[in-house]
Amino acid sequence: MTAGAAVGRPGGRTAAVVRIGSGVAVAGFLATAIAVVGVLTAAAVDAPPRHPAGGAHGGASGTPAPPATASGSPASAAPTALPSAGGHGARVVYSLGRHRVWLVDARGGVLRTYEVRAGRIAPARGTHRVFARERGQVVLFASTDGVNVGFAPAAGAGASGAVIREAPDDAAALWQHAPTGSLVAVVP
C-alpha cells in the first residue's frame, strides 16, 4: 500500500488517500473466490449425488432385474423395471403408483425389489433422506403435514397411517441398505 496526498474535506479537516497496489487487489479477489467455492462445496455435500447413467439395471439378489431392450434400457412393460426418474447412485426408490420398492447400489444396479402396502398418508414426490431409524426396523424418510412417513415390517410396531408396510425379510434388507442419511427417491 502507498499513501497518497492529503485531501481536503469540508470543515477544514483532511483525510489521507490510500492506494492499494494491484497485487493486493488480486489477492483479495482470489481470497473471495476461494471462499465462494468453499461455501458452494459445503452446500453440494447435502445435494443428491449425480452419476452418469449406465447400462441396464442388473440385480444381485431378490427379484431379478427385467430384461433389457435393444437400446440397453430396461423393458418399460416390466412391472419390476426400475423407474428412470428414480435418480442415480445408491438409494431406495419407492413408486407410489406401483406400490414397489427398489434397493439400488452405487452403480445403479438393483439389489432387490419388492411390493409394499402403502399407508393412508403418502410422502411427497422427490428426493428425501432417511432421518431416523426406530426399534422394529422402522425407517423414516419424509414428513407430510407434520406426520412422519416411513417403511416398517407388516407385523412390526407403529400402526400409523403413514407407514409403508413391507414383508419382514424385505424390511430387514431395507434396514441394512438404508442407514440414516441415505437417499429415498419417491416417484409416481
Image (cartoon, helix red, strand yellow):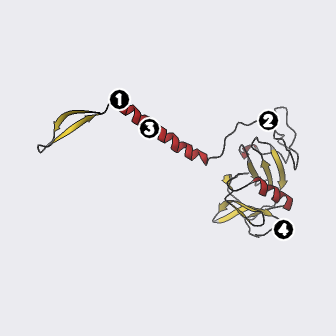
Pointer 2 or 3: first along the chain: 3
Can you tell which mark lies on residue 155?
Answer: 4
Pointer 3 or 4: first along the chain: 3
> For the residues carrying marks 2 and 3, which lies nearer the camera in this image?
3
Q: CA distance from mark 2 to mark 3?
A: 42 Å
Secondary structure state at the residue bearing disc 4: loop
Q: CA distance from mark 1 to mark 3?
A: 14 Å
Q: Residue furthest left?
A: 12
Pointer 1 or 4: first along the chain: 1
Q: Quadrant of residue 179?
A: bottom right
Query: Where 89 sits versus 122, above or below?
Result: above
Q: CA distance from mark 1 to mark 4?
A: 71 Å
> For the residues carrying marks 3 and 4, which lies nearer the camera in this image?
3
Crowd around label 1: few <14 · some 14–19 · many ≥20 (10 Å)? few
Q: CA distance from mark 1 to mark 2?
A: 52 Å
Pointer 1 or 3: first along the chain: 1
- Can you identify the residue that label 1 sits on? 22
> For the residues carrying marks 1 and 2, which lies nearer the camera in this image?
1
Crowd around label 2: few <14 · some 14–19 · many ≥20 (10 Å)? some
Q: Are marks 1 and 2 in contact (CB under 8 Å)?
A: no
Pointer 1 or 2: first along the chain: 1
> For the residues carrying marks 1 and 4, which lies nearer the camera in this image?
1
Asked whether, in this view, residue 47 is left or right of residue 57, the answer is left
Q: Are marks 2 and 3 in contact (CB under 8 Å)?
A: no
Where residue 30 appears, x then y in whole percent?
44, 34
